[in-house]
Image: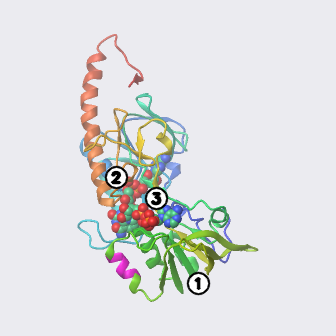
Amino acid sequence: MQAPAALPSFHGMPWLYPGPNQPDLKAAAMSDTRHTRLLIIGSGPAGYTAGVYASRAMLEPILVQGIQPGGQLTITTDVENWPGDSSVMGPDLMERMQNHAREMGTEIIGDHINSLDLSRRPFTAVGDSGTTYTADALVLATGAQAKWLGLPSEEHFKGFGVSACATCDGFFYRGKEIVVVGGGNTAVEEALFLTNFASKVTLIHRRDSLRAEKIMQDRLFKHPKVAVIWNHTIEEVVGGDNPRGVEAVRIRDVNTGELSEVPCAGFFVAIGHAPASELIKDQLELHNGGYVKVVPGTTQTSVPGVFAAGDLTDHIYRQAVTSAGMGCMAALDAEKFLAEHETVAETAAAPGAAQAGTPR
Ligand code: FAD
Ligand code: NAP
């Protein structure tokens, strides 16, 4: 993890940002087995809300935070659409959610799940700490992760001028020129935030209109430090190796094919997020490029007892408030599932009918 002295960086990895909610991996450092009625994986708005509701239903849930405690909102600044707060800082909001879940009785563990077995109940999850978690029911709330363009030069300069997190890395580009690629809310928000540091911010978008909310677009177009280049794609990140650093991006006009270069010291990729469904991609039904499929109007996945909430299952809304709402639904769905199945199990577990690891 080395960064050049001139342009230190958290390698474009939001979860490496040393914010207030870094996981305490020591908390789960011992390799042991923990059983819980309800395991919640993920600590964004969906996970913490599931924790609040499940705790109040006396399910004594365990919540595993993952490598980005607090989730995506910890890498943004002002959140203006969380009901009840016309303006709140993302990291502060997530810290409040964490405290709320903990105060209600959720056990919050700093660990990251690296494998999951959903083939039988209790379900089994193994953490990087070595701890094995077994659970009668599961809420998956692993959210989404930043997408990259997939260019070899982008990979080469990741952490050396290429980033996906303005909040983490913007500070390193004081007085320099920055390019942002993307046309959604994230790109516009990142571009505006970066004007706090940069001498100039150029937003490059592949079409001739943005998909960001109108109010955000207005702010962008009015900003004196911002320029927008329409109808261009990124061809290559251009830079040097001694020291390694970005000097420009080469772009292509989608109409004429003409190539040109935009000088910059920092290149921020803000082209959306992909659901973090790698862990379960062969075990649950997915749709729309990796989002977990749920029974409409519920959080029930294709495996009974496994519930999904938040950006992991939502390719349309992808908001903090909708994620929190689904976290609530998942906890209520899990409570109902456990009530029904524990009654069945108790009946079946009459003398001589012991069940360990019930095939689902
Ligand atoms: P996330 O917030 O994505 O959290 C996922 C969690 O899962 C993380 O804690 C992660 O550590 C954990 N995890 C992942 N994999 C594992 C694993 N294997 N083991 C254990 N844990 C794991 N929405 C708004 O409503 N308003 C805004 O102003 C706004 N601003 C935004 C700004 C930016 C820059 C971005 C990127 C998004 C913004 N959003 C905003 C969208 C909002 O952040 C998301 O919709 C919301 O955070 C999704 O919540 P979630 O709980 O589904 O998952
Ligand atoms: P998004 O809405 O999916 O937008 C992604 C943008 O990147 C699109 O403009 C897309 O172009 C462009 N893009 C995608 N792949 C590309 C590629 N390979 N090369 C060049 N451009 C590419 O993603 P997002 O902006 O991250 O937003 C995700 C969700 O979070 C949204 O629901 C958003 O509302 C929410 N969010 C909300 C706020 C807020 O409320 N303040 C802030 C941030 C995010 P096209 O337009 O051509 O498809």
Q: Splitting the image into 4 quarters, where does residue 139 fall? A: top left
Question: Secondary structure beneath disc 1?
Answer: loop
Q: Disc 3, ligand 2: is the CB inside 8 Å?
A: yes
Q: Looking at the image, is mark 2 or mark 1 earlier in the sequence?
A: 2
Closer to the chain start, of discs 3 and 1, is: 1
Residue that mark 2 sits on: 46
Kind of residue at disc 3: His
Residue that badge 1 annotates: 176
- In x, y percent, where is residue 252? 59, 72
In magenta segment, residue 279: no
Residue 176 appearing in the image: yes
Helix, strand or loop at label 2? It is helix
For the view shown, which residue lies furthest in the bottom direction?
224
> Do the residues under discs 3 and 1 have CB atoms within 8 angstroms?
no
Position in image of residue 241 (x %, y %)? 74, 71
For residue 266, side relative to residue 303 (left or right): right
